[in-house]
């Protein structure tokens, strides 16, 4: 299985913080972003998704950093399809509810990254007329959970639309839903995509990048 070494992860984190273009995603956000991207039922060109991490400024991206990101991509892909996918250990819920929405908080960052990556396919699947209603409902719930802590204002709108409209009660429920959905998300996307009639199970699976 592909796996970043501690030194590679430290190096990537430091580079993203100190040398990357302004607006670049944090390491935790990159992990959430890649989780969303890898689940896509459509093949996404590396140049498409890589640019979103760096505000489309990839011309000066060092080869060593590109290779580390490739390893991280393949590591997350292996976890999603060949192992057990879980949240990064740093992505935990803080009892102080508002802290979970702050820039730099791991839960916020992971959800922010996911929100950046889901746009490659979410509307296409949600708008597919033949899609299974049951799977669309599960997909919608997964998107709601995975993006909940990305934006405080949007989260408040979600809370107000619910019967239990107290964010102090609702937020921990959303974190639990993230944990519940994360392991089966890739399988959910696969089944939903097949139900739309737009894909078939003979389509090639996404190969590991740079392997």
Image (cartoon, rainbow, N blue to C red):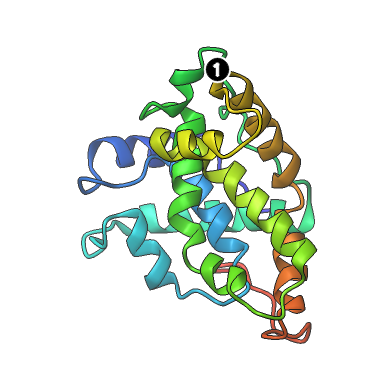
In depth, the one of 74 and 132 nearer the eye is 132
Taking the image as drawn, is residue 207 in sight?
A: yes
In depth, the one of 6 and 149 nearer the eye is 149
**Is 66 placed left or right of 179 in the picture?**
left
Q: Residue shown at 64%/58% (left/top)? A: 77
Q: Secondary structure at mark 1?
A: loop
55 is higher (above) or lower (below) than 164: below
23 is higher (above) or lower (below) than 94: below
Alpha-carbon neighbours of circle 1 within 10 Å: few (<14), some, or many (≥20)?
Answer: some
Residue 16, quarter of picture: top left
Taking the image as drawn, is residue 64 in sight?
A: no
- Percent x, y of residue 201: 78, 82
**Is 3 placed left or right of 157 in the picture?**
right
Q: Residue shown at 26%/56% (left/top)? A: 55
In depth, the one of 144 and 205 nearer the eye is 144
Q: Residue shown at 44%/43% (left/top)? A: 112
* Count of marks, rendered view: 1
Q: Residue shown at 47%/39% (left/top)? A: 157
Quadrant housing the C terminus: bottom right
- Percent x, y of residue 107: 52, 31
175 is higher (above) or lower (below) than 81: above
- Percent x, y of residue 173: 68, 29
- Percent x, y of residue 110: 50, 40
| Residue farthest top in this picture | 96
Q: Which residue is mark 1?
A: 94
Residue 121, quarter of picture: bottom right
């Amino acid at each position: 299985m592909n796996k970043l070494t501690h030194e590679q992860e430290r190096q990537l984190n430091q580079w993203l913080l100190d040398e990357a273009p302004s607006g670049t995603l944090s390491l935790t956000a990159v992990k959430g972003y890649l989780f969303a991207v890898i689940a896509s039922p459509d093949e996404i060109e590396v140049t498409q998704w890589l640019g979103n991490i760096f505000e489309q400024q990839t011309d000066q991206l060092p080869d060593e950093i590109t290779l580390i990101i490739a390893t991280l991509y393949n590591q997350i892909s292996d976890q999603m399809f060949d192992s057990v996918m879980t949240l990064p250990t740093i992505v935990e819920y803080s009892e102080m509810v508002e802290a979970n929405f702050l820039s730099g908080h791991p839960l916020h960052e992971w959800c922010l990254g996911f929100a950046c990556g889901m746009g490659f396919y979410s509307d296409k699947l949600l708008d597919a007329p033949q899609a299974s209603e049951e799977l669309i409902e599960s997909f919608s719930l997964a998107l709601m959970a995975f993006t909940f802590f990305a934006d405080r204002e949007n989260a408040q709108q979600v809370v107000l639309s619910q019967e239990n409209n107290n964010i102090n009660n609702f937020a921990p429920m959303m974190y639990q839903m993230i944990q519940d959905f994360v392991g089966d998300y890739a399988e959910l996307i696969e089944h939903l995509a097949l139900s739309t009639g737009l894909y078939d199970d003979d389509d090639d699976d996404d190969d590991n990048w740079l392997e």
